[in-house]
Amino acid sequence: MLGKLIKYEFKATGRLLLPVYGALLLMGGVVNLGLTLQGKLPVLKFAQGVLIFAYVALMVAAFALSFFVVISRFYKNLICDEGYLMFTLPVKAGTHLLAKTVVSTVWSVGTCLAAVGSLLLMGAGHGIISQLPDVLRAANVAMKGELGMGMSELLLWTLFTVLVSLVVTNLMCYLSISIGQFGRGHRILTSVGAYLVLNVVIQSISTVALLVACLFTGLDFFGDVPLGQMAGFLRMVFALSIGLNVFFGGCFYAGSNFILSRKLNLE
Amino acid sequence: MNRDAIISCQGLQKRYSYKLALNGLTLEIPRGKIVGLLGPNGSGKTTFIKLVSGLLTPTAGELLVGGHRPGVESKRIVSYLPERTYLNDWMRVEGILEMFSDFYPDFNEAKARDMLARLGINLKDKLKTMSKGTKEKVQLILVMSREAELYLLDEPIGGVDPAARDYILDTIISNYSENATVLISTHLISDIEKVLDEVVFIKNGQMVLQSSVDDIRASWGISVDQLFREEFRC
């Protein structure tokens, strides 16, 4: 059943997001073409500025739309009228939640990959991509010398942290929307309120956790971190961030599952 | 509780924060009958149907559907038609047929296609391009094309014209599985009375009467509609 739910979830969301990815990649190609042509036609320098602006706007819109599509899909498909169909399918509420979590994660990663692909398309054929390995190698050496941590390790930590954050953000939205259904007649307002409260709670817990971690490791929470200790500090922050996010994500998932299984009240 | 009945509940209670919708409802719905769940607005009909279909959890009491507590097993044997349109608007009719086939092994796709064809509904049409009445008919066809043990129809003829009401009632009668139970919730009694075997009157979240239609006519000498008007007079 999970596979079937995922299939329909991809169908419902892909019809909106795939054209956006296509537009992003196309725009990368158009900007690339502009860069190529402006060398031959200086008048295009003005148009290039407009193109770059449109490209950046499209990039921002792609990320915003990706987030909006997965969140509004959850709301419309489970809490609105479509919920009468979905919750009468012979499937547990937790399976619905898992299907939506899997698909939203894929789209979050997909949007990032589309953005990177679009940037690479934009720079292709202008020496940017060919210079990239040398630039990264030089940055790696410089960072290792200064921070004690190489570029590749920093990138890996960052990617993993961002990925976990994306999943947890979606789960927090799902829990907020699940709580929102208790706000009879004011579901969206209640969801927004729940989201703000959850945000305050997790920020508070995260700050306290970082403070405690600094106390245990002897680092000064309020002062500057000495350069020699920077690598250790960064690893601690990343590990703490990932660990806390996994904990929060588990709580959000359990909370949503409980509400949708035991306290569902579709209007 | 009688596990042979398709629905069996004892002391069933459902409380919302603002209201006690079901107040200790005890009843049994037998297999193989068309049963009318009749009561005025706010009597608890929709709440009961949502509890049976697994959309709500009881506050107190016991409820069994086909011998199971409402959950994945009961949802396999229950075909539910809510009083609202619940289909994904962006989908085409053929897409929703595929979805029902995927999730319900008892879904008879050939029967559904035949009924849709007789209504002149194009399978390539998107649901959002259809009128409200046509969408409701598509929904009804999907629900009645399942070979379920229990059909729950919540106000299936409310808000439709008389010709459409006849079509809906004919579709219900000619398409439900022989040993299945059809539970129809409505307050439009006169239209539905002719198809009912039994009726359950519900008021303020409790059952006030359960009887066969023939017994009502024999004992009271009046129609179910007339008895309803007397029972629930304002």
Image (cartoon, coloured by chain):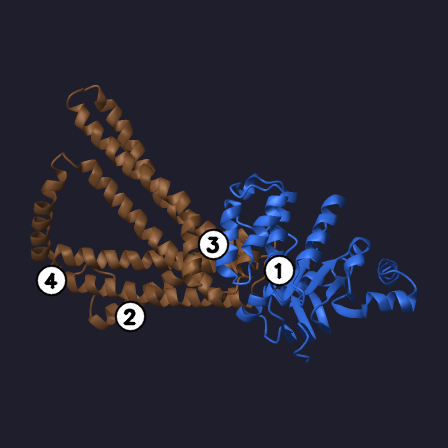
Chain colours: A brown, B blue
Along the viewing direction, whichever of A216 and A75 lies nearer the viewer: A75
Of the two numbered discs 3 and 4 on the same chain, state the one appearing first in sequence.
3
Please, which chain is the residue tagged with disc 2 on?
A: A
Work out how far the residue at label 3 is from the one at label 4, CA to CA, in angstroms.
46 Å
- The mark found on residue B80 in the picture is 1
Dot 4 corresponds to which residue? A228
Work out how far the residue at label 2 is from the one at label 3, CA to CA, in angstroms.
36 Å
Dot 2 corresponds to which residue? A212
Pair 3/4: label in front? 3
SS state under label 1: strand
Q: Which of the 4 image quarters holds residue A58?
A: top left
Work out how far the residue at label 3 is from the one at label 1, CA to CA, in angstroms.
22 Å
SS state under label 2: helix
Mark 4 burial class by Cα count in 10 Å: few <14, some 14-19, many 20+: few
Pair 1/4: label in front? 1
- The mark found on residue A74 in the picture is 3
In the rendered image, the residue lying farthest to the right is B221
Place of residue B227 in the rendered image (x, y in percent of width and height, measured from the top left): 87, 62
Along the viewing direction, whichever of B20 and A189 lies nearer the viewer: B20
Callouts 2 and 1 close, C-beta under 8 Å: no
Q: Which of the 4 image quarters holds residue A49?
A: top left
Residue type indicated by callout 3 = Phe
Report the residue at 24% width, 68% height from top: A214
Please, which chain is the residue tagged with disc 3 on?
A: A
Circles 4 and 2 on the same chain: yes
Q: In this view, does A132 lie above or below A255?
A: above
**Which quadrant, please, contains the C terminus of chain A?**
bottom right
Work out how far the residue at label 2 is from the one at label 1, CA to CA, in angstroms.
54 Å
Of the two numbered discs 2 and 3 on the same chain, state the one appearing first in sequence.
3
Work out how far the residue at label 4 is from the one at label 2, CA to CA, in angstroms.
21 Å
Work out how far the residue at label 1 is from the one at label 4, CA to CA, in angstroms.
66 Å
Pair 2/1: label in front? 1
